[in-house]
Amino acid sequence: GRLSWFAGLPPNSPPAAVNSNLVHYRELTVVGAHGSTPSQNRAAIALLASGEVQAADLVSGSYPLAETPAAVAAMAGGKELKSVVQVSG
């Protein structure tokens, strides 16, 4: 499986805890994702504003952090294409 980690935290935040056994034994790939160029942001906003791209269609599932294994299982089983794991809220 693959986990795209887009989670820049404020400087004084505690480090994020990751279950290293889950990553190791399930042979997960964890990749960091960081931003895009201003022109890419403008193009994406234009697509969303025009209705050509529906924001709700981009995410197939949303899970609280405690349910990360369920999110990974849903993606691995082909039930989800792009899931969001929410760290808070």
Image: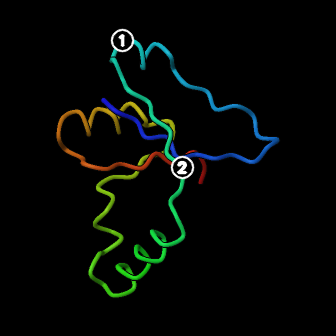
Q: Secondary structure at mark 1?
A: helix
Amino acid type, label 2: His
In the displayed structure, 75 sits above or below 19; it is below
Residue 21: x percent and y percent? Answer: 46, 13
The C terminus - image quarter? bottom right
Image quadrant of residue 43? bottom left
Please state, as top left, top right, bottom left or bottom right, where the N terminus lies in the image. top left
Q: On the image, which quarter does residue 47 sit in? A: bottom left
Check disc 1 and report the residue beneath it. Answer: 25
User: In the image, which disc is placed on residue 59?
Assistant: none
- 79 on left or right of 19: left
- Quadrant assignment, res 59: bottom left
**Residue 23, placed above or below residue 16:** above
Compared with residue 66, is residue 44 higher up or lower down, i.e. above or below?
A: below
Q: Residue tagged by mark 2?
A: 34
| Circle 1 Cα neighbour tier, 10 Å, few/some/many (<14 / 14–19 / ≥20) | few
Depth check: give the residue in front, 75 or 35: 35
Residue 71 is left or right of residue 19, and the answer is left
Could you say where residue 18 lies in the image, as x and y percent from the top left?
Answer: 55, 25
Q: Along the polypeptide, which appears first: circle 2 or circle 1?
A: 1
Q: Amino acid at mark 1?
A: Tyr
Left or right position of 43 against 11: left
Number of numbered markers: 2
Are circles 2 and 1 on residues that touch, CB within 8 Å?
A: no
Looking at the rendered structure, the secondary structure element under dot 2 is: loop
Q: Residue at x 38, y 30 (%)?
A: 69
**Disc 2/disc 1 C-alpha distance (Å):** 26 Å
- Residue plotted at (31% across, 50% down): 82
Of residue 65 and residue 30, the one placed in the foreground of this image is 30
Q: Is residue 25 above or below residue 9?
A: above
Residue at image position (50%, 36%) is 66
